[in-house]
Image (tube, coloured by chain):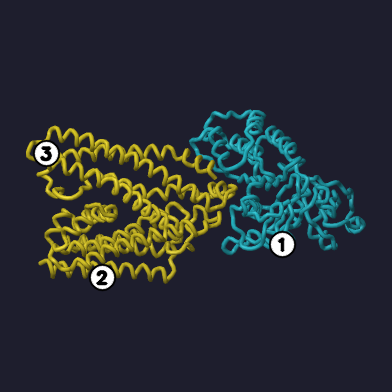
Chain colours: A cyan, B yellow
């Protein structure tokens, strides 16, 4: 388990991580948030790349800057380093002088991803390079694997294969996957951590996300606007027009009569919210709360 | 950690090959000079007594040049965020990574230097044997003496070079580690090395001013003395920038101003300056914490002494060149001052990565420019009064 207590990290006048207290449990954790929410900073703080200004990070009870704790963490940044003139095999060897890696597992994953090991890394496309580094991260013997924007530039077929590999590997490991693209984390993560302006807004199972939010499809003879709904005392989180139908998400359950009495309603129906959309709505709620 | 050091040495194999090839090539060319001296001892009177550094001198110069610039290469691991991401998260103490990176470079360069020295001594032995056979009857005893003396001389000189070369490495480390970005490290290294050389040269030039101690200083400068590598650099510096004439001739021509005691004091002062900076380098190497990863590749002007070193070094460089140019004519002097100002602002702006200077920063620059003009004017006045 990774325990974070009152963590603070500032860059000049910007508080990238602001008094963050958080627990990262075993399994696959998604770290989501807007650009600049502090996701990458948090991963770098956990992996001891950055020094915290304040607060502590404990990895299985050990402070994160201790060698024994660092052995348990493997961090794959969004732009990992590899000497340009090295072949894949050489890059693997280079990394293996720094980290404990499982070669058999690495080769198996490379084979599943149809990646050659004798080519120079400079000849790889962005997606292939990304696949190689994920294979490298999967071969790590560390208990905690942190991946930053790991799925950027991957095609859906490869993404599915990698997701399966991560799910299989997560039985005895903890994954922390950061992404601003929520659809990549769909049907992968057990738990979501929502960051906003360096603070944790939510750390919960996917089933508990957006529990209070309700979504309605509304069609009326009159034009409906967000402001009108808010003037009726309803707390609107999201308002979108799709053709003539209005998709409205409210923070809490509403009394449908309020709308029915105000408009000549043709359709006023409560519909389910997609898990994917739920995370986006949580992010939106966090942003509004900040304002 | 052993695995990492071994891996680091393996990664630096291309560097090792380049270093060794360069140093061995220098050794091969230098051995030609030694052959020449041995074959024509009468035409090289400066080598007529005592040990000679001929042959070793170019090798030491190259060795010192490598020792000056290699810390930049070893510091590579903290010049980009991508590298910081990799090296800082590695399951080792952060200082261990620094030790491994620098020590592996030192091992490589010392092996290369040792191989080149062995090659040089081997070639000298070969050529000397050849010279003995071909030497004329009248000079053969003399040739034999020089040869045997040299063998005794080379071994301590090798160890002295290694010690001083390592000191030079840590001096450069101290300068280079003032910044986390390669560009600034180069700027601080160049200006810092220049400032150090300028101080040493000023002291050395006092020593030149006596004929009474000429033989003593001569031994200090060219003999089996730890001063040799420093003075080698000083000598190059002197010849190129200040005197622009034969160094040895100067020693004999200058008047007798100061006593041997003063010369000794100045010589020791030289060592104190040199080794103080080297010790600062070692302290910084062992004690100073690496900056947090976000500073990788960034100037990090909060690092102590970075700006001071730059201003002092750049100011001294300007002073020396402007003094030299002023002796030529006023037009060249003014042109140089314009050039000096034109390069000072962009370089300082690059160093602090902010071209909008604050009033106190402009004040420091103005002070440096004033210093350059004043010292070059005083130098020109004393030159005209005492030499003409």
Q: Give the distance between the C-alpha atoms of the residues marked 3 and 1, in whole angstroms.
A: 93 Å
Q: Give the distance between the C-alpha atoms of the residues marked 2 and 1, in whole angstroms.
A: 59 Å
Quarter of the image holding residue B235? Answer: bottom left
* Quarter the N terminus of chain B occupies: top right
Chain hosting mark 2 = B
Answer left or right for B297 relative to A272.
left
* Quarter the C terminus of chain B occupies: bottom left
Q: Nearer the viewer, residue B139 or B335?
A: B139
For image coordinates 42% across by 53% down, the residue present is B183
Q: Give the labeled residue for mark 3.
A: B140
Chain hosting mark 1 = A
| Image: A109 above or below B259 | above
Answer left or right for A167 relative to B64.
right
Q: Give the labeled residue for mark 2.
A: B374
Can residue B245 be seen? no
Helix, strand or loop at label 1? It is helix
Q: Position of residue A137 (x, y in %)?
A: 64, 40
Q: Nearer the viewer, residue A34 or B27?
A: B27
**In terms of sequence position, does the residue under pointer 3 or pointer 2 come before the other?**
3
Q: Give the labeled residue for mark 1.
A: A290
Q: Badge 2 local density, few (<14 within 10 Å), some, or many (20+)?
A: some
Q: Position of residue B316 (x, y in %)?
A: 30, 63
Q: Give the distance between the C-alpha atoms of the residues marked 3 and 2, in whole angstroms.
A: 57 Å
């Amino acid at each position: 388990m990774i325990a974070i207590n009152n963590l603070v990290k500032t860059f000049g006048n910007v508080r990238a991580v602001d008094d963050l207290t958080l627990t990262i449990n075993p399994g696959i954790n998604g770290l989501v948030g807007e650009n600049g929410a502090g996701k990458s900073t948090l991963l770098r703080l956990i992996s001891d790349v950055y020094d915290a200004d304040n607060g502590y990070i404990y990895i299985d009870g050990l402070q994160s800057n201790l060698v024994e704790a660092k052995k348990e963490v493997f961090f794959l940044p969004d732009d990992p380093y590899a000497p340009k003139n090295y072949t894949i095999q050489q890059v693997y060897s280079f990394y293996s002088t720094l980290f404990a890696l499982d070669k058999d597992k690495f080769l198996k994953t490379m084979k599943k991803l149809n990646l050659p090991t004798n080519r120079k890394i400079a000849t790889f496309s962005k997606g292939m390079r990304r696949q190689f580094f994920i294979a490298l991260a999967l071969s790590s013997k560390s208990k905690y694997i942190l991946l930053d924007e790991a799925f950027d530039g991957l095609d859906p077929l490869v993404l599915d294969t990698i997701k399966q590999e991560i799910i299989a590997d997560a039985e005895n490991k903890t994954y922390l996957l950061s992404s601003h693209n929520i659809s990549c984390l769909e049907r992968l993560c057990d738990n979501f951590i929502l960051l906003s302006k360096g603070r944790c807004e939510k750390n919960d199972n996917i089933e508990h996300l957006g529990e209070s939010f309700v979504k309605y499809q509304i069609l009326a003879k009159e034009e409906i606007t967000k402001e009108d709904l808010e003037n009726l005392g309803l707390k609107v989180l999201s308002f979108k027009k799709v053709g003539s139908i209005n998709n409205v998400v409210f923070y809490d359950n509403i009394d449908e009569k309020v709308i029915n009495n105000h408009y000549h309603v043709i359709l006023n129906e409560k519909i389910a919210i997609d898990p994917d959309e739920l995370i986006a709505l949580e992010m939106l709620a966090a942003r509004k709360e900040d304002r | 950690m052993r695995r990492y050091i071994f891996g680091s040495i393996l990664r630096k194999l291309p560097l090792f090959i380049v270093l060794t090839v360069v140093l061995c090539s220098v050794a091969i060319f230098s051995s030609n000079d030694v052959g020449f001296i041995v074959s024509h001892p009468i035409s090289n009177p400066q080598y007529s007594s005592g040990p000679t550094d001929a042959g070793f001198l170019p090798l030491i110069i190259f060795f010192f040049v490598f020792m000056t610039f290699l810390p930049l290469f070893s510091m590579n691991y903290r010049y980009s965020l991508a590298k910081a991401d990799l090296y800082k998260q590695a399951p080792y103490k952060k200082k261990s990574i620094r030790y491994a990176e620098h020590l592996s470079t030192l091992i490589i360069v010392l092996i290369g230097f040792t191989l080149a020295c062995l090659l040089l001594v081997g070639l000298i032995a070969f050529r000397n044997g050849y010279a003995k056979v071909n030497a004329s009857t009248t000079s053969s005893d003399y040739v034999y003496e020089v040869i045997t003396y040299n063998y005794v001389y080379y071994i301590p000189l090798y160890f002295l070079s290694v010690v001083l070369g390592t000191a030079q490495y840590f001096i450069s480390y101290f300068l280079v580690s003032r910044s986390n970005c390669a560009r600034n490290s180069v700027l601080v290294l160049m200006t810092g090395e220049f400032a150090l050389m300028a101080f040493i040269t000023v002291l050395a030039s006092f020593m030149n001013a006596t004929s009474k101690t000429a033989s003593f200083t001569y031994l200090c400068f060219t003999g089996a003395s730890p001063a040799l590598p420093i003075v080698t650099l000083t000598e190059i510096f002197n010849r190129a920038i200040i005197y622009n004439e034969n160094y040895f001739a100067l020693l004999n021509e200058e008047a007798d101003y100061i006593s041997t005691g003063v010369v000794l004091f100045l010589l020791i002062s030289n060592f104190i300056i040199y080794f103080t900076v080297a010790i600062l380098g070692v302290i910084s190497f062992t004690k100073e914490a690496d900056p947090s990863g976000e500073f990788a590749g960034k100037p990090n002007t909060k690092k102590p002494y970075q700006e001071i070193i730059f201003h002092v070094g750049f100011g001294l460089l300007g002073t020396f060149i402007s003094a030299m140019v002023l002796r030529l004519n006023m037009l060249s002097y003014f042109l140089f001052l314009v050039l000096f100002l034109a390069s000072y602002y962009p370089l300082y702006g690059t160093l602090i990565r902010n071209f909008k200077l604050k009033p106190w920063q402009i004040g420091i620059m103005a002070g440096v420019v004033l210093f350059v003009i004043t010292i070059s004017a005083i130098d020109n006045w004393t030159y005209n009064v005492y030499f003409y």
